[in-house]
Amino acid sequence: MPPAGMPDMPKVDRKIIVPKEVSSKWKAVKLTIDDKAAKSSKEYTINVGGQQALPNTKLTVKVVAFLPDFRMGEQDITSASDKPNNPAAQIAVLEGGKEIWKGWLYSMHPGIHPFQHEKINITLNGGVSK
């Protein structure tokens, strides 16, 4: 449900375009995983296209794409430059091998569309250059 007064926006499938200068410069992302029950945090470095099983859960985090200067247009999502001006990572969360969430995490705006789960929080810290 959108907030009161906000129109219900139709979902648009936008093409993700990773410019060559971005894919040649950035190889991985740093994610912080907060274990709510244990009240602990751990930072993981996960390659773009790679995945990480999360200890004490049935969850796996997969990094689909990283855009250091995230820009969303009407038809696509891309990076305006290879500089970390607005870092964002598209991640998928799998539970028992089944995708339960897929979305974008923003290091400068962690409250926008966060992954919500009873056991963990996931925060994007930024990208890792080659």
Image (cartoon, rainbow, N blue to C red):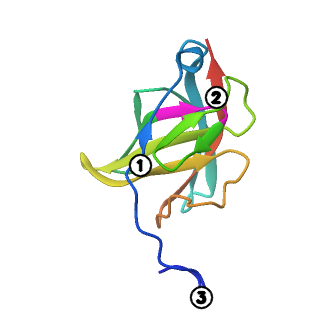
Q: Which residue is mark 2?
A: 127
Badge 1, how many Cα within 10 Å: few under 14, some, many 20+?
few
| Label 3 element class | loop
Residue type highlighted by circle 1 = Asn
Task: Identify which residue, 3 or 115, lies in the foreground.
Answer: 3
Question: At which x and y percent is residue 4?
Answer: 59, 88
| Label 2 element class | strand
- Residue 56's tag is 1
Q: Quadrant of the C terminus?
A: top right
Relative to 88, is 40 above or below? below
Instruction: Please give the name of the residue rendered at 75% of the width and 35% of the height, measured from the top-left corner.
Output: 85
Overall secondary structure of the magenta section? strand
Instruction: Please give the name of the residue rendered at 56% of the width and 61% of the height, measured from the top-left corner.
Output: 113
Given the current orientation, which residue lies at the most extreme front position? Answer: 74
Relative to 48, is 118 above or below? below
Q: Earlier in the sequence, mark 1 or mark 3?
A: 3
Q: Earlier in the sequence, mark 1 or mark 2?
A: 1
Q: Earlier in the sequence, mark 3 or mark 2?
A: 3
Residue type highlighted by circle 3 = Ala
Q: Which residues are magenta?
A: 65-69
Residue type highlighted by circle 2 = Gly
Q: Which quadrant would residue 126 be assigned to in this image?
A: top right
Question: At which x and y percent is residue 77?
Answer: 51, 41
Q: Is residue 55 visible?
A: no
Q: Which quadrant would residue 92 be assigned to in this image?
A: top left
The Cα atoms of the two marked residues, 3 and 2, are separated by: 35 Å
Judged by depth in the image, the label closer to the viewer, 3 or 2, is: 3
Question: At which x and y percent is residue 6?
Answer: 58, 81
Instruction: Please give the name of the residue rendered at 73% of the width and 25% of the height, measured from the top-left corner.
Output: 83
Relative to 78, is 115 above or below? below
Q: Which residue is mark 3?
A: 4
Badge 2, how many Cα within 10 Å: few under 14, some, many 20+?
many
